[in-house]
Amino acid sequence: MNEVAQVEEFEARIRQGEKIEPKDWMPERYRKQLVRMMSQHAHSEVVGMLPEGNWITRAPSLRRKMALLAKVQDEAGHGLYIYSATETLGVDRDDLVQALLEGKAKYSSIFNYPTLTWADIGVIGWFVDGAAIVNQTMLAKASYGPYARAMIRICKEENFHKKQGYEICVTMARGTPEQREMLQDAINRWWWPTLMMFGPPDKDSTNSAELLRWKVKQKSNDELRRHFVNITVPQVQALGMTLPDPDLKYDEEAGAWRFGAIDWDEFWRVVRGRGPCNRERLRARRAAHEAGAWVRAAAEAYAAKQRAKQETNGVRAA
Ligand code: 3HC
């Protein structure tokens, strides 16, 4: 079948809501888009461990420490899960990780901001994982089977992440004036970077048209961003906190919250490597990769030994 007919058949499958599996024919462009998006997602999960990991040794109680440890561990697992899903597209995980370490691969802008107080840990769980749930619930319906299935498991764990974060915020909102002030400060610092997580405005989204046509994305960046604002503003109000947006206003007719202009210059500055913590995050990832070299060598040596044993047994049996 020529390529035109193959693309038509592929797009008909997508329109019918079929899942595309690794062994199915797919346009090279579809594969490339998935490798780009999924590898950046995996990088984000792994780099995302750093801002919160910074507070594991300083958690205010054993209970908080255990919950944060579990969350950070989950993020590592999400990264490995999504790298595995990306490898079904014929790419090598080592190449993907190398691109990250060399600063050639993107990861989510949100992880380039510092975690200055314990309240940041609560607000990250509430805002950042809350935004991830909005985005990943959509991706759980993606046309590429391995990605969609990875999202189903990850979303379950993200719900725990959001709950533990919001519980930290509720505790602080009911706490001393200093704790309330600390919480309000964290909300003020994380609100706008969280809205930026959903990507540039639709008019500047270079990938959305293809991703929407091929049902990798089901909703646009702006649609998801608006949905996140609509569900989060009432939660902020329930805590008696405010948002750093003087233009935030409820539109009765539309039944939605209208919000102010996002600083897209800041967004692109952070995406292009000039955010508050970009250098620190990459330095930490490179150091961790270096320090883990012996673990990878030991695992490869063990795997080689197992393969040799199987071959010997195979020869003996034959
Ligand atoms: N940070 C860094 N780069 C971003 C970005 C962000 N928040 N948003 C967009 N970009 C980049 C895109 O990668 C693209 O650059 P590229 O073409 O060189 O890759 C460019 O800006 C234009 O953006 P587009 O809207 O065209 O890009 P997409 O259509 O890919 O949409 C996205 C961006 C919404 C992030 C989409 O890629 C996506 O949904 N990715 C999967 C989910 C994901 O990666 N989430 C990151 C957070 S992970 C997380 O939250 C973990 C949780 O446990 C906390």
Image (cartoon, helix red, strand yellow):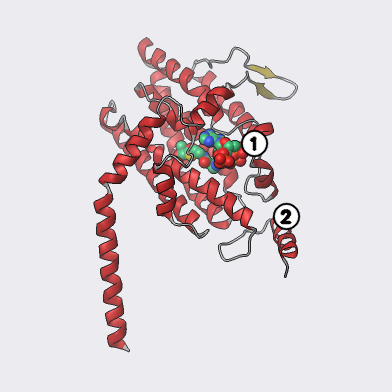
Crowdedness of circle 1 by 10 Å Cα count: few (<14), some, many (20+)?
Answer: few
Query: Is 4 positioned to the left or the right of 95 in the image?
Result: right
Circle 2 — which element?
A: helix
x, y percentage for residue 147? 54, 52
Q: Quadrant of the C terminus?
A: bottom left
Amino acid type at mark 1? Ser
In the image, 91: left or right of 60? right
Pick whichever, 112 or 164, lies toward us.
Answer: 112
The quadrant of the picture occupied by the N terminus is bottom right
Q: Quadrant of residue 170?
A: top left
Label 2 and label 1: CA atoms lie apart by: 22 Å
Mark yes or no: residue 130 visible: yes
The outermost residue toward the bottom is 318
**Residue that badge 1 annotates:** 205
Q: Mark 2 = which residue?
A: 15
**How many discs mark residues in the rendered view?**
2
Q: Is mark 1 within 8 Å of ligand 1?
A: yes
Quick check: 143 above or below 260? Answer: below
Q: Residue shown at 66%/38% (left/top)?
A: 220
Q: Is residue 208 above or below residue 314?
A: above
CB within 8 Å, label 2 to label 1? no
